Image (cartoon, coloured by chain):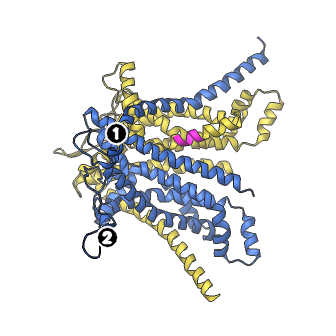
Amino acid sequence: MRIRLFKEFIIEKLIFLSGIASILFVILIFVFLLKEGLSFFKEINLFKFISGKHWYPISEPEQFGILPMILGSLLVTLGAIIFAVPLSIGAAFYISEVAPGKIKDILKAGIEMLAAIPSVVLGFIGMITLVPLVKNVLHLPTGLTAFSGSIMLGLMSMPTIISISEDAINAVPKSYKEGALALGATRWQAMYRVTIYAALPGIIAASMLGIGRVIGETMAVMMITGNAAVIPHTFFQPVRTLTATIAAEMGETVYGSMHYYSLFAIGIILFIITFIINITADMVLHRKHK
Amino acid sequence: MNKTKQNKIIDKCFGFLGIAATLFGLIMLLVFIIDVLSDGLGRINWSFFTSFPSRKPEQAGILSAWVGSVWTMFITAMIALPLGIGAGIHLEEYARKSRLTNFIEINIANLAGVPSVIYGLLGLGLFVRYLQLDRSVLAGGFTLALLILPVIILSTREALRAVPFSMREASYAVGATKWQTVRYQVLPAAFGNILTGIILAMSRAVGETAPLITIGALTYIAFLPQSPIYFSSGFPYLHFSLKGLFDPFTVLPIQIFNWVSRPQKGFFTNAAAGIIVLLGLTLIMNTLAIILRHHHQKKIRW
């Protein structure tokens, strides 16, 4: 009895430790990120960093302006969302309201598979199929554009948006729809006049999480969007995103140089952007539950 | 045409549009993937798995890449699984509801959504530089472990939460302690879902590229990390060594990316072949997870 109690005590303490450890770990690490990045902002003004138009991290004199990358990230994300949100909402409605049981299972499995494809694979696929296609169909000098990136990232964000929207649609009380149908509405009318409004917070949250996924995506954009650090004017020119800048340049930086710290600073900006998006989506979702 | 008829037609159209929207992404991707696969399929043979990368595309293989992937996955699992599952059990079964746990919960949920490239920065700053692990297998494994830790915590908690409270109460009622309840009732009931979560998290780690590129693993590697067990002709014949943990490494997705960035056409075929292997691996893992979950849902009825 004593031994068993002792054993239990040890195990429970171990569980407690691993719980605390992993949480501490995670928090400490973000403190670390801040520490590395903030030393950069002592030298360079935050406002100048964000609004600077030129990114020449290793020329003399060096210039750290990430406006082109911020705009690049925004442009690709905007395009992806315009492409993915309507399709995903349509798909979510079809899966939860229209599709018969068997087809529903198959489609859900298919969408889960879509979510599982590594981004380097999607990048490669986009590079050898979509990029030449965009170039030839639209008669552009290069197919490595924000537009191509948007389509590929739109595809990537669809599983997230579809599955969370579908949950939201399923959570709408059946009585709402039945009420509409009883009043003589068709299935379609019940959907776009009643169900969609009830599920709206969930759908908005789903779209925001989709945006979060797109902004943070690295490999596919790095391979498809052309990586030109200039301020974009249209969808059909090469852009460079925040994430691609970090991944592409970190390998070449000298440890402890301004360039090294500037990439951590970009990391902080990116972290803050995604954090705000995720927190907001979380709040929208939770308000719905109340 | 009267209104009712019109509405009925719109209704039909919607059904059709819904199918189109659902299938659009899937079919588009399927066509693209088949296009790629047909490129790479001819390149897959035994020597592709047993050769090191090379300057000549026809001779290059993925030996160092897949061995590196196995190493990193092993380290990642060794760290992330105990910590993640432990943290999940702690938060769900033991921790009292308080402001602090609430704060922690929100943070973990958010960390699961942080871009993977940021974990690369953390790995670089913390493991590669600060702890001076250099660009070793260990640093790579640690980085990926951090990346999937929040995912594992979340899925463990969700699995535990799905176990009905009455099961715990019944266990307490017959005199079981807290740990006995968790160990003999809750964990077995949640096991299938926890396993599903683990497999999905590991499949994400296998395909992850950006954080490893950020910590600087994008290099030409034509050797393997020192094997943990090896034989020698002299006494004591069998050796154990952990030196391999500190060797530089490459992984499958990075090898693919490396080949993609080469100008020669032959390397594209290699990349396509590498992608078949990687895609096959992740799809097998995901199918397994889906089957497991389906099986589990069928088996348990409460």
Chain name for mark 2: B
Which region shows up in magenta?
A109-113
Foreground of the two, A18 or A259: A18
Q: Is residue A68 above or below residue B284?
A: above
Q: In the rendered structure, which amino acid carries the disc numbered 2?
A: Ser
Residue shown at 35% from the left, 23% from the top: A135
> Can residue A47 be seen?
no
Instruction: Tell me what residue is drawn at x 66 percent, y 66 percent.
Output: B186
List the residue tagged with mark 2.
B241
Label 2: few (<14), some or many (≥20) within 10 Å?
Answer: few
Q: Residue at x 67, y 72 (%)?
A: B181
Looking at the rendered structure, the secondary structure element under dot 2 is loop
Q: Position of residue A152 (x, y in %)?
A: 44, 34
Mark drawn on residue B271: 1
Q: Residue furthest top?
A: B1
Q: Residues within 10 Å of mark 1 (few under 14, many from 20)?
A: many
Residue A1 x, y percent position in the rendering: 65, 87
Q: Chain coloured yellow: which letter?
A: A
Q: Residue at x 56, y 50 (%)?
A: B288
**Residue extending furthest right?**
A182
Q: Secondary structure at mark 1?
A: helix
Above/below status of B268 relative to B116: above
Q: Is residue A139 above or below residue B134?
A: above
| Closer to the camera in the image, A223 or B125 | A223
Quarter of the image holding residue A136? top left
The image quadrant of residue B140 is: bottom left
User: Is residue B277 toward the left or the right of residue A82 in the image?
Assistant: left
